[in-house]
Image: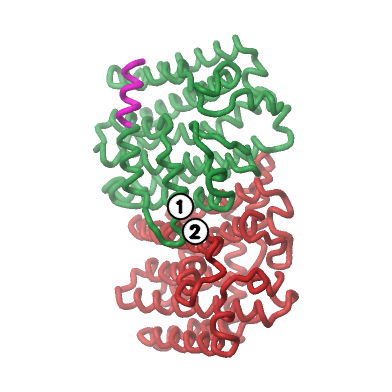
Chain colours: A red, B green
C-alpha cells in the first residue's frame, strides 16, 4: 500500500507539473476562463486516471514524456466532467477536494466555459506529436477518448444519473450507470497505456478487464465511503447520494455484501494481470488501494 | 445570389443527411441526451460553416465524402456552442431558429450534456478515416478545430462576451471579441478545406484572410439585422444586444458606417481569392450573400 501511495504521489506531481505547462495563462479579458480551467485542473486530487495511464504504459516501456502527455489530457477531461457535474443544474455541489467548486468561486457561465475549454484542450494535447511520434497512435488515443467521454460513455452516464428513474434503478441499472459515468474513463486510462505501448490484443483485453473491475470496485467503495467516511476524510459532503434517494450499490446490496463484492472485484482485477507477471505488481497493489482508500 | 442560395441549400441537405447518420440514436435511459443532440444538430440553419468547408475543399478537388465528414464535425461544434450559449447562465435565449432552445425544451442539465456530447463527437468524426485517408491530415484537422474552438478561440470569445466590461468595449475590443467568438470557427471552416486539399501556404493564407473578412462582415451584418430585421425574418428576438447595453459595431460606428465597413470587408474578401481565379466564383458570391442576407 505504501508503494502505491508513493507512486501515486510521484505521478501526481509530474502530472500537476505538466498540466501547469500545458494550460495557457493569459491576462486578457477572457483570462478568467483560463484561470478557472487552471483552478480545476491544478486543484490536486488522487490523479488516479493519469497514474493508470502511466503505469500501464510503463508495462510496455513507453517513453515517459509521451505517457505523461496522455495522462494530462485525460485528467483535463476528468476535471471538465467534475466542473460540469458540480453545476447547480446537475449535482449542485459547493465543495470539491476541500475547495469551492468552480461555479461557486466564479459563476455558472465561467464553469460551463471552463469545462468546455478543458475538454477541447485535451484533444489538442493528444493531437500534438508530443503525445506520441506516430500519427496512427495519436488518432487511436483520440478516438478512444472521444468514445469513452461522449454520449455513449461518460456523458451518457451522467445523463442516466440525472434521469427521473435514477431513484429506482436496479443492480443492473446502477452497474450500467457506473460503467458509463466513471468506468469508461478509468477503462480508457488503461487502454491508453496499451495503445501507447502498441499492445497485442490479449494484453489490451487484459488491461481493459482489469480496468473494468477496478472501476466498478472504485464506485462501490465510493458508495461505502458516502456511508462510512467523514467530510474531513473525503473533502466533500458525505451521505449525499443516499439522502437524495438515489439507488446505490450499498442500498441494493447492504454494507457487508457491497464490501464483499468490491473485494471480489479487486481479486478479479489482480488475476487479469497474470500475463504481465511481476511487471504488474504496482497495478495489483493499486487494485488493493482502490479497495482500502478513505477518500 | 440565387446560385449561392441554391448551393447553400444543396450543401445543407447533404450535411443534414450526414449529421443524421453520424449521430447515434438510442432508446436507453441516456437516450434523451442523444435526442437533444439530434434536435440541436438537425434543427436546420444556414449551415454556412459546413458550406465553407465543402466549397473551399472543392477548390482542391477534395473527395466530397471527406469534406462532408469534416463539415458535419464542424457543424456539431457550432451547434454545441449555440446550445451552451443559449443557457440561462449565458445568453438566456428561449428561441433559436424559430424553435425552443434545448434547455427550454428539456432542461439545463440536458443542454449542458448535449453540448458536451456534440463537442466530443466532433473529434470522434475527425479522427475516423472517413474524414480523410491520411492520418496526418486528420490530425491537422483535429488540432485546428481544437485551437479554433477552445479558450484561445470560440470559448475565449464567449467569455469576453459575458465579461463585466462587455458594455464598454471599444471598436478594437468588439473586433477581437468577434474574431474569437464567431470568427475563429468561420476561419477554421475555410482552413479545413485547405488542409483537406493539402493547399500550399499561399492558398492556405488566402483562404484564411478571406474567412477573416467574411467572418467580421458576418458579425457586422448580425448587428445590423439586430437593429433592422424582424424576429420573423431572423427566427429569434431582435434588438437584444443593444437592449442589453452591449457595445456593438452599429453602436460604435452608426448604421451607415457599419454597413460601409461590411461592404468594404466583402470587397476585400473577394480580392483575397484572386489566386483561385474563376474556380472561386461561388465563394465570391458567398461574400456578397453574407452582406445581403436577412437572417
Relative to residue A235, is residue A25 depicted above or below? Answer: above
Q: Residue at x 39, y 74 (%)?
A: A208
In this view of the protein, which residue sits in the foreground, B5 or B28? B28
> Is B36 one of the magenta-colored residues?
no
Classed neighbour count for the residue bearing mark 1: other residues with Cα under 10 Å, few (<14), some (14–19), many (≥20): many
In this view of the protein, which residue sits in the foreground, A106 or A6? A106
Chain bearing tag 2 is: A
Residue A218: % across, % down: 54, 77
Q: Residue at x 49, y 50 (%)?
A: B114
Which residue lies under the disc numbered 1? B120
Mark linked to residue A98: none
In this view of the protein, which residue sits in the foreground, B83 or B107? B107
Quadrant housing residue A136: bottom left
Using residue B291 as the reference point, say whether residue A46 is left or right of it.
Answer: right
Specify whether residue B254 is in view. yes
Question: Chief secondary structure of the magenta span?
Answer: helix
Specify whether residue A295 is in view. no
Chain bearing tag 1 is: B
In this view of the protein, which residue sits in the foreground, B240 or B159? B240
Residue B290: % across, % down: 45, 20
Say if mark 1 contacts mark 2, CB within 8 Å.
Answer: yes
Q: Residue at x 54, y 66 (%)?
A: A166
Residue B221: % across, % down: 53, 20
Mark linked to residue A155: 2
Range shown magenta: B1-11
Amino acid at each position: 500500500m505504501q508503494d502505491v501511495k508513493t507512486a501515486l504521489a510521484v505521478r501526481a506531481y509530474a502530472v500537476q507539473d505538466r498540466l501547469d505547462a500545458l494550460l495557457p495563462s493569459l491576462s486578457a479579458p477572457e483570462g478568467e476562463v483560463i484561470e478557472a480551467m487552471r483552478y480545476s485542473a491544478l486543484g490536486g486530487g488522487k490523479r488516479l486516471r493519469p497514474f493508470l495511464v502511466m503505469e500501464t504504459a510503463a508495462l510496455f516501456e513507453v517513453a515517459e514524456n509521451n505517457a505523461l502527455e496522455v495522462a494530462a489530457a485525460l485528467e483535463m477531461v476528468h476535471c471538465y466532467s467534475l466542473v460540469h457535474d458540480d453545476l447547480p443544474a446537475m449535482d449542485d455541489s459547493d465543495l470539491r477536494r476541500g475547495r469551492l467548486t468552480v461555479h461557486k468561486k466564479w459563476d455558472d457561465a465561467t464553469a460551463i466555459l471552463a469545462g468546455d475549454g478543458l475538454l477541447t484542450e485535451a484533444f489538442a494535447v493528444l493531437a500534438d506529436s508530443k503525445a506520441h511520434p506516430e500519427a496512427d497512435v495519436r488518432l487511436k488515443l483520440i478516438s478512444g477518448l472521444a468514445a469513452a467521454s461522449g454520449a455513449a460513455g461518460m456523458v451518457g452516464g451522467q445523463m442516466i444519473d440525472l434521469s427521473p428513474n435514477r431513484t429506482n434503478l436496479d443492480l443492473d441499472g446502477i452497474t450500467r450507470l457506473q460503467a458509463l459515468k466513471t468506468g469508461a474513463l478509468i477503462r480508457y486510462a488503461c487502454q491508453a497505456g496499451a495503445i501507447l505501448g502498441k499492445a497485442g490484443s490479449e494484453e489490451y483485453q487484459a488491461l481493459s478487464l482489469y480496468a473494468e473491475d477496478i472501476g466498478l470496485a472504485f464506485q462501490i467503495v465510493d458508495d461505502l465511503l458516502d456511508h462510512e467516511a467523514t467530510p474531513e476524510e473525503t473533502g466533500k459532503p458525505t451521505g449525499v447520494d443516499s439522502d437524495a434517494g438515489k439507488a446505490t450499490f450499498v442500498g441494493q446490496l447492504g454494507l457487508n455484501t457491497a464490501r464483499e463484492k468490491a473485494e471480489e472485484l479487486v481479486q478479479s482485477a489482480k488475476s487479469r494481470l497474470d500475463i504481465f507477471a511481476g511487471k504488474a505488481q504496482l497495478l495489483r497493489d493499486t487494485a488493493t488501494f482502490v479497495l482500502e482508500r478513505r477518500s
